[in-house]
Image (tube, rainbow, N blue to C red):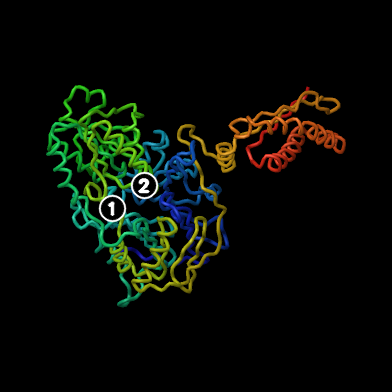
Amino acid sequence: MATKVKKVDNRVLRLYVLGGLHELGKNMFVFEAHNADKPEESEYIILDAGLRYIGHEEPGIDYAMADYRFLKDKKKQIKALILSSPHDRHCGAAHQIICNLEIENVYGPGLALELTKAELNPETVKKINWTLLDSRFEIDLGPFHLTSYYITSHTGENYALLIEALGKKIFYSGSFKIDQTPTDSRKTDISGMLSHLEAKAEFAKSADLYIGDSTNVEFTGYSKSEKDILPTFKKIFAENKESRIIVNTYDSNVVRIVNLFALAQEFNRKVVLVHRNMRKVVAAVERLTTYDINDDMIISIQEAKDHKDSELLMLTGSPEDLALDSLEMITYNKSLELNLKEGDVIVNSADLPPGTVRKMAQISDQCFLRSVKMIGGRNANVNVESNALTEELKFMFNVTRPKYFLPALGETRQLVKHAKLAVETGFDPGSILILDNGDVIEFADNNVVRVIDQVPYEEILYSMMDHYVLEEHLVKTRDVMSREGVVIVSFSLNRKNKKIVAGPLFSAKACTFSKNKEWKAFCMFNTQPIVEAVDALYSGKPEATIQECEEIVKSHMQKVIKQQIGKRPELIVHASQV
């Protein structure tokens, strides 16, 4: 039984929702034991530190993470970071949070900790206290008492969490599915959850707030078990004994990856890990004793050349949001590691990300042209749901019996549908919280949960190639340049009398109008107005800086380009002094 935490005088529990709302990924929640009299003595814990992959719509940006910057001046008050899952949506940005907020204590599933350590330098890893979660594992962090419960998931090891603080109980499901026949025989610890969430009277409310997974709320029924697709894979292996088999799946689906290793061993095939993501995950799995992977089965791309096709299983994968990326690279010969050949068999063991039906059709066409067999799709039975469906979500309502419900871990339509599902189970609509990232809620003494504030919020964008955080204005500038091009205006000023002595020169790059006669006329007609604008500036303000001069010209040019050409390209003005 979890130890009850008594309320501390002058303290109130607050929850900062920093990510995971109206989006898939970037999951992050911060709990604060707020001390109104002495804010500097308030204490915090961070639950999850995920990322959201951007995809191809914004080139140069790899992923986004929650805006945690309000915590930068509270580093010493942060007790710990707790990770609920090894999925990127829950732990993908943990290394960033650890470094930037100087986190000293990290709790989580073994795989989540291993994946996080792999992104940190060895010296940082040594400074941190790493603690493995287990079912019914209890953690005391000042005013916070946490209990973790094993819950089945495609990632292999997820934990739901009960947070008790200042007399309140919050239950966080994390990402989950109720798999009744897991391949590793380890089932969701339902009895543990019920024992810790017991109410004083029958039908009484157990938790003050339930934060629930909304990812798959659009699909009715129960999710299938990973065990359900094993017969199909065995059939594929048996019917294609002479072919090289290539399986594309989610790099987060550790359960399926382990099962595929077992099948490869059964059918006497070596395993080749294609692309970095798959190698990173398998390397982390190998460092754990939880999973049974025979290291002798893994060979490199180079070593595969010495084996027959009948002896090879190629595993490739990407995150859910980019599930076709690896497959696309292979089928279009963009991969530096693997080239398709006639007779290959590809199994696409993944759902199509939204908006990629056409891309999948083109991939299938490429396979057809190369005489490569493609197996996949809804009726192929080579993929099952990664998250809980409606009946499992209803089950969690009955287990937690909360006073308030916060739909999370989903896009807007999913949050709303999850709220409607809660009402169908008898939940009071007035006790459902549809929040935005950045919202702050407070747990009052009268059992009321209310939104009290919103912290400044702007998601943090990151480029893995440059190891650089991109500011929002840079992203907007890139977007404008990609759509409208760029116009450059340059001129030189006499350092003494501030008169233009060279230029202005106009240059339009990647602009649809730059080859037109109207552009040449535009340049001719706007030379003199720029000269007059600069003269007017220095006549009225002789001490004006070169930057002020550039801003005057930029303001003038933005207006006339919009008025005379009807475009809004990115505008660069460069003035020099001679």
Q: Is residue 344 left or right of residue 549?
A: left
Residue 551, x across and y down, in percent: 73, 38
Residue 48, x across and y down, in percent: 41, 51
Instruction: Determine whether label 2 and label 1 are within 8 Å by CB.
Output: no
SS of the residue under disc 2: loop
Q: Which residue is mark 1?
A: 385
SS of the residue under disc 1: loop
Q: Is residue 366 visible?
A: yes
Quadrant of the rendered structure where residue 172 is? bottom left
Q: Is residue 423 left or right of residue 300?
A: right
Residue 353 - label:
2
Residue at image position (52%, 59%) is: 439
Residue at image position (57%, 42%) is: 476
Quadrant of the rendered structure where residue 194 is? bottom left
Residue 216, x across and y down, in percent: 34, 57
The residue nearer to you, when weighing 165 against 336, is 336
* Residue type (three-letter) at the residue carrying disc 1: Glu
Residue 423 - label:
none
Crowding at dot 2, Cα within 10 Å, few <14 / some 14-19 / many 20+, comes out as: few
Crowding at dot 1, Cα within 10 Å, few <14 / some 14-19 / many 20+, comes out as: some
Q: Is residue 184 visible?
A: no
Residue 329, x across and y down, in percent: 35, 33
The residue nearer to you, when weighing 532 against 368, is 368
Quadrant of the rendered structure where residue 233 is? top left
Q: Where's the C terminus, which quadrant?
A: top right
Residue at image position (34%, 45%) is: 112
